[in-house]
């Protein structure tokens, strides 16, 4: 019990490693007062060997065989469990203080369409539960896919809870490796989908050309010029014209995709980076045109890319742009907090209204529960 507020803590841990694959975001969240309060958070980088194993599994851009994922699933489970233990130590807590862990895991394949739809996240919930001694909820996307949905994005579920404002049309933009938007209509309706690449291609190009994992603050892109011929090739991707619900990932927007569009062009490297930034900005703006959005809230790693945000502001002058920090949640920890919240919802037995977001046929109970 908090002696100052009289509110009993209700603690959950949320874990996610996104498409950037740089490490694990871990957040300790208190729901005692209803709205999530972020108590402690950290990003734990992957060891080089583990990152290499993940990259090797993803690199062929095809669905991995079950045997290839088995060992990595267990290794990631161990890594995630140790991250939870570090988080508890930093907060001066014991496992018994935490209600549950919600672990998204590391996506290695996302193919929600076709005759055998699947979205595969590694990081065994069973291993996490048994090492930490804390109930763990994982495999959040499978139930939605089984109900005919895309399984992604799931972030709009929390965006609706935290950022909807009656009478104002808002959009929440998550700029991770992939960009997704949530449109929060003034009347309470919500839709959301992946618009395409956010940072994944820019990070790839920065790593390839400068051996740097990302373009700090967008400064490199800002020194380049948009090459209209390249941009036209980039925008000529059927995914951008597909109607929602839709979701995507590194299965599509990867090195092979980019290299195909660069073929035959001899361009300064920074002009390619500038064109990739323009691709992100234009596809996001196109997703929100004619929606009546009055305010844009940004989260994810791309919220630190000042150049990209400035370009978005130029393309969307009618929608003042800010980050989710101004509305109570730091932009770096929205997704980790999402999976803490989804774990809480799962333990409460609350189905999620994913149909308008993912296209599922009905509301679904998300996540599998693993007891220690």
Image (tube, rainbow, N blue to C red):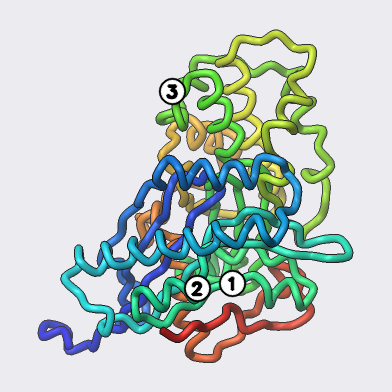
According to the picture, the residue beneath numbered tag 3 turns out to be 219
Between discs 3 and 2, the one toward the N terminus: 2
Residue nearest the observer in this picture, 119 or 365:
119
Can you see residue 166? no
User: Residue 54: x and y, percent?
Assistant: 55, 47
Residue nearest the observer in this picture, 235 or 95:
95
According to the picture, the residue beneath numbered tag 1 turns out to be 139
According to the picture, the residue beneath numbered tag 2 turns out to be 125
Q: Residues within 10 Å of mark 3 (few under 14, many from 20)?
A: some
Q: State the image quarter where residue 353 is shown.
A: bottom right
Q: Residue at x 82, y 33 (%)?
A: 236
Q: State the image quarter where residue 183 is shown.
A: bottom right
Q: Which residue is drawn at 41% across and 84% down?
A: 372
- Whole-angstrom CA distance, mark 1 to mark 3, is 37 Å
Between discs 1 and 2, the one toward the N terminus: 2
Can you see residue 152? yes
SS of the residue under disc 3: helix
User: Residue 79: x and y, percent?
Assistant: 40, 59
- Whole-angstrom CA distance, mark 3 to mark 2, is 39 Å
- Please give left or right for residue 286 compared with residue 127 in the image: right
Determine the residue located farthest toward the right in the rendered image: 115
Depth-wise, is mark 1 or mark 3 nearer the camera?
1
User: Residue 267: x and y, percent?
Assistant: 66, 10
Depth-wise, is mark 1 or mark 2 nearer the camera?
2
- Whole-angstrom CA distance, mark 1 to mark 2, is 8 Å
SS of the residue under disc 1: loop
Q: How crowded is mark 1: few (under 14 residues within 10 Å), some or many (20 or more)?
A: many
> Which quarter of the rendered picture does the N terminus lie within?
bottom left
Q: How crowded is mark 2: few (under 14 residues within 10 Å), some or many (20 or more)?
A: many
User: Residue 354: x and y, percent?
Assistant: 67, 74
Q: Residue at x 50, y 46 (%)?
A: 21
Q: Residue at x 55, y 23 (%)?
A: 208
């Amino acid at each position: 019990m908090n002696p100052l507020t009289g509110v009993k803590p209700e603690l959950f841990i949320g874990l996610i490693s996104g498409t950037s694959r740089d490490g694990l975001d871990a957040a300790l969240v208190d729901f005692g007062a209803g709205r999530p309060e972020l108590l402690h958070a950290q990003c734990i980088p992957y060891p080089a060997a583990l990152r290499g194993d993940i990259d090797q599994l993803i690199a062929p851009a095809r669905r991995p065989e079950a045997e290839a994922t088995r060992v990595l699933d267990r290794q990631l489970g161990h890594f995630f469990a140790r991250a939870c233990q570090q988080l508890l130590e930093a907060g001066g807590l014991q496992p018994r203080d935490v209600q549950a862990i919600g672990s998204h895991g590391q996506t290695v394949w996302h193919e929600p369409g076709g005759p055998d739809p699947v979205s595969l996240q590694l990081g065994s919930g069973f291993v996490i539960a048994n090492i930490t001694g804390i109930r763990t909820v994982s495999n959040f996307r499978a139930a939605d896919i089984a109900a005919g949905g895309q399984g992604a994005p799931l972030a709009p579920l929390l965006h609706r809870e935290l950022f909807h404002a009656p009478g104002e049309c808002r959009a929440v933009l998550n700029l991770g490796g992939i960009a997704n938007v949530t449109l929060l209509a003034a009347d309470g309706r919500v839709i959301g989908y992946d618009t395409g690449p956010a940072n994944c291609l820019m990070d790839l190009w920065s790593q390839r050309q400068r051996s740097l994992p990302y373009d700090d603050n967008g400064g490199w892109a800002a020194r380049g010029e948009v090459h209209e011929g390249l941009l036209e090739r980039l925008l000529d991707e059927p995914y951008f014209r597909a109607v929602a619900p839709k979701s995507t990932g590194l299965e599509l927007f990867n090195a092979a995709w980019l290299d195909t569009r660069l073929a035959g062009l001899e361009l300064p490297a920074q002009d390619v980076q500038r064109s990739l930034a323009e691709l992100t900005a234009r596809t996001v703006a196109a997703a929100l045109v004619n929606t009546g959005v009055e305010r844009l809230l940004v989260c994810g790693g791309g919220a630190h890319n000042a150049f990209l945000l400035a370009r978005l502001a130029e393309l969307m002058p009618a929608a003042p742009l800010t980050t989710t920090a101004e509305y109570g949640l730091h932009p770096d920890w929205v997704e980790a907090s999402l999976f803490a919240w989804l774990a809480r919802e799962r333990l409460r037995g609350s189905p999620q209204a994913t149909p308008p977001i993912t296209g599922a046929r009905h509301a679904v109970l998300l996540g599998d529960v693993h007891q220690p």
